[in-house]
Image (tube, grey):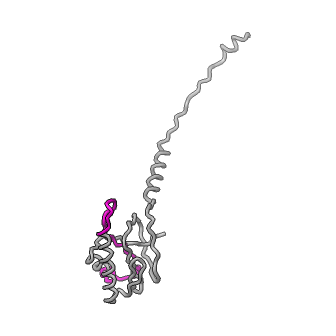
Amino acid sequence: MNFRDKFKRKKKVQTTVEEFDITSLLDILVILLVFLLTRYDASDFRIDLTNNLTLPSAFQKALVRRGEVIQVNSNRTIFLNGKDFGSLFSSVAIEKLTNALRERGIQIDKKDDSETPKAKIINLVFDKNLDYRSIDKILTLSASVGFTEYKLIVEEEK
């Protein structure tokens, strides 16, 4: 057996390329992407809660736009942007709150900023045990001075 015969007798090894199916991998990546996008909250909106205020829970959250924050705690004390205005059923407190909201509405109307819309938004934060009559009173008061867009702030269920 000579040197040439050795090379002639060798069988060529066939190499096959295996195909890799990435369909299932792509499905998982799409699901992860959708999950991450629905859980992303770009808002930096934060509220310092007042005393005696327990928030109700929610199943879904959306972006919160900046606006006035009205909080009513379990004692039915009204707070506008953290400032105590007194009892919800006190006519003096209601008058002070109405005047403060009216003044804030005038400031929003005068604001010369063409990039952002002049929306009069109220972010509502209510104690979870607050009755509807109290909530209705705040909504009616807000609407009467021009704040007709509401966002209800609740605590996310864990």
Quarter of the figure with the N terminus: top right
Q: Residue furthest left?
A: 144
Residue drawn 33% across and 75% down?
Answer: 104
Relative vertical location of residue 142 with respect to residue 3 in this rendering, above or below:
below
Q: Nearer the viewer, residue 148 or 120?
A: 120
Residue drawn 30% across and 66% down?
Answer: 118
Image quadrant of residue 101? bottom left
User: Where does the image place residue 127, in percent across and percent down from the top left?
Assistant: 41, 80
Q: Nearer the viewer, residue 135 or 17?
A: 135
In the image, 86: left or right of 21?
A: left
User: Where does the image place residue 124, in percent across and percent down from the top left?
Assistant: 37, 75
User: Where does the image place residue 141, in percent across and percent down from the top left?
Assistant: 29, 80
Image quadrant of residue 81? bottom left
Relative vertical location of residue 45 with respect to residue 82 in this rendering, above or below:
above
User: Where does the image place residue 15, in percent across and percent down from the top left?
Assistant: 59, 26
- Whether the magenta-drawn stretch holds residue 54 is answered as no
The span shown in magenta is 110-137
Relative vertical location of residue 94 with respect to residue 28 in this rendering, above or below:
below
Q: Nearer the viewer, residue 92 or 41?
A: 92
